[in-house]
Amino acid sequence: MIKACKYRSCRTPKTERLRDACESKGEECSIEVVAVNIDGKEIQVNKGTTILEAARRIGIKIPTLCYHEDLCVAGICRICLVEVEDSNTLEAACSYSIYKSLKIKTHTPKIRRARKNVLELMLASHVGECYSCIRNNNCELQRLAMEYGITSYSFGHENTPKKGVDKTSHSIVRDMDKCILCRRCVRSCIDLQEVGVYTVKNRGKDSSIATFKDCSMEDAVCINCGQCVNRCPTGALHEKDETEEVWRALEDSSKHVVIQTAPAPRAGIGEEFGMPPGTPLTLEMNTALRYCGFKRVFDTCFTADLTIIEEGTELLVRLKDQLIGEKKKVLPMFTSCSPGWVKYLEHFYPEFIPSLSTAKSPQQMFGSIIKTYYAKTHNIDPKDIVTVALMPCTAKKFEAGRPEMNSSGYRDVDYGLTTREMAKMFRETGIDLPNMEKSGFDTPFGGGSGSGIIFGATGGVMESAIRTLFELVTGDEINSLFQHGEIKEVRGFEDVKYMELEIPKVGEVPEILRGVVDDFNFLKGATLKVAICHGTANARRVLEDIKAGGVFSECHFIEFMACPGGCLGGGGQPIPTDENIRRERAKAIYSEDNEASVRKSYQNQEVLKLYEEFLPEGPGCKKAHKYLHTSYTPRGKEEIKI
Ligand code: SF4
Ligand code: SF4
Ligand code: SF4
Ligand code: FES
């Protein structure tokens, strides 16, 4: 039985919310339609549609800055001003809802002058140094200044930085001299993530974006998700750039520098090179990474498969204890591979820490395996190995620096680079990524299954876990229930998804699980209840529901990802982002899975070989716990420095 839960947030268009309200009452939707004329073009729109939405629908471009598709409308920057019949003032197109037939003009001389004024006022307090700015060539302010022909500064121009740059966070850098007060960061942090790091301080010309209590980003209760960075239109927010450190390691001939690449950057990096969203460049990137000097290029999907085995084993043990054991283990179990989500839980719901799987994330498992098993089998001193991770995520930088992530005696992962940082390194090397030759990953960790690949999308961890657990427990192929093993019920961008799956039978315990359980009788007749949730605002709703004893408290396993859409919408992915872009990236990920020859984690032969040679006592054994599992830190609302 499949059930889906719908949550509607304030970023859902008003007309859709009205329609939902009618549907929930079983009434026919009676939203009325009105005719509007925009720049001479007629269009019929539902009452409540904004001028901006209507104009976009007929291909008329109105500039925006504070507006973002993923966020609630703020209507504060005034760059989207338009003329509306019957109105004495110019109106903001992003916040003006149409309720009657109107004539609207979007590009008169008066409008152009007003927009130019808005831009010049912004530039008066903006420290402009585009050539040395991280957003040079991908800055909404710079682009508008160019489009509106700004060649002089009527209200003056600031050249001297005054506010200082906050580089204290492991992940996020704030340069408020470049801030244009659009408040997209404030809304990203509050609406999408319900974290609330930022606030608006003072009013009028003294207004600024500040952190709570004006603390540094290091001391702020920030989960490092980077969603504010993804939506900042300028260079005021960006990730902590570690490319120089990586270049230095690559130049050091005494170092053996290896890189692992996660699936989501592969589906996004093409956007940095002018390709449409969702252009997969996995094999081109492998060649480019070797050209940059990396000694080995490995696939994080390998340890995604390993995560499924370790996390799946942990789930089986918890299920057994819950269903027939005396010592009740905590259910539902929560996934632990999204470091933004983990930190969110540590801050806001530390009482749920026992619910988190103790399995390290694929990034960290990889680092640990490289500095132990790989170092030994390749006769390299782990102190001479530098592990770099290419991730879609700014929180991975924080995760790499967690003090407990050093089971080999060295940091599991030395540097976590975002997709944007990697693209920067390629550009610095003159690499034309889309036209690079294709090449495969290196052995022994170059083989990930399709299950490992779909970790990049929300629902991917759950789908992978179900594929493997179902087959190991029942002995039947997952294809007997889901065509081509595609569990569509857990895919997609619904805020929270819920699914129940009856276990039709149990089989013999396969060899890989012989040290874990004696039989599967405890699962006879059981119904597995799972949920999938992305974005920490949605996570909060699920956790509150569990606390209240709601439907999610009955779940056995819940996948949580901090970022909207999962890793493909990570804070280190190419800018811009919106739901359409994230959908295209998801298509690339699922099509790679679709074409993979091995699509279930437990069938990954390299993972099985790792168990045979390095972890002979099998999944969940003492040694596996030492290298592949971790612990967590209750943080509460006061940040504990690492
Ligand atoms: S934020 Fe934009 S306009 Fe400002 S310096 Fe950077 S690129 Fe230039
Ligand atoms: S930091 Fe960026 S997103 Fe936040 S208000 Fe300033 S310009 Fe806007
Ligand atoms: S990184 Fe995430 S939690 Fe931190 S300020 Fe930005 S949106 Fe908020
Ligand atoms: S984009 Fe409309 S007011 Fe900012």
Image (spheres, helix red, strand yellow):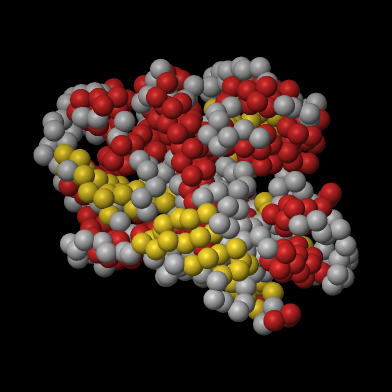
Q: Residue furthest front?
A: 40
How many numbered badges does the structure rendering display?
0
160 w.r.t. 584: above or below: below
508 w.r.t. 189: above or below: above
Place of residue 240 in the rendered image (x, y in percent of width and height, measured from the top left): 70, 51
126 w.r.t. 428: above or below: below
Residue in view at x 32 percent, y 42 percent = 490
369 w.r.t. 327: above or below: above
**Quarter-of-image position of residue 518:** top left
Residue in view at x 36 percent, y 34 percent = 464
Q: Nearer the viewer, residue 89 or 101?
A: 101
Quarter in which the C terminus is drawn: bottom right
**Quarter-of-image position of residue 257:** top right
Can residue 333 be seen?
no
Place of residue 617 in the rendered image (x, y in percent of width and height, measured from the top left): 38, 28
**Quarter-of-image position of residue 35:** bottom left
Residue in view at x 48 percent, y 31 percent = 588
Quarter in which the N terminus is drawn: top left
Residue in view at x 68 percent, y 21 percent = 436
Can residue 450 be seen?
yes
Q: Nearer the viewer, residue 373 or 436?
A: 436
Q: Residue furthest bottom?
A: 203
Relative side of 422 to 159, left or right: left
Q: Nearer the viewer, residue 215 or 620?
A: 215
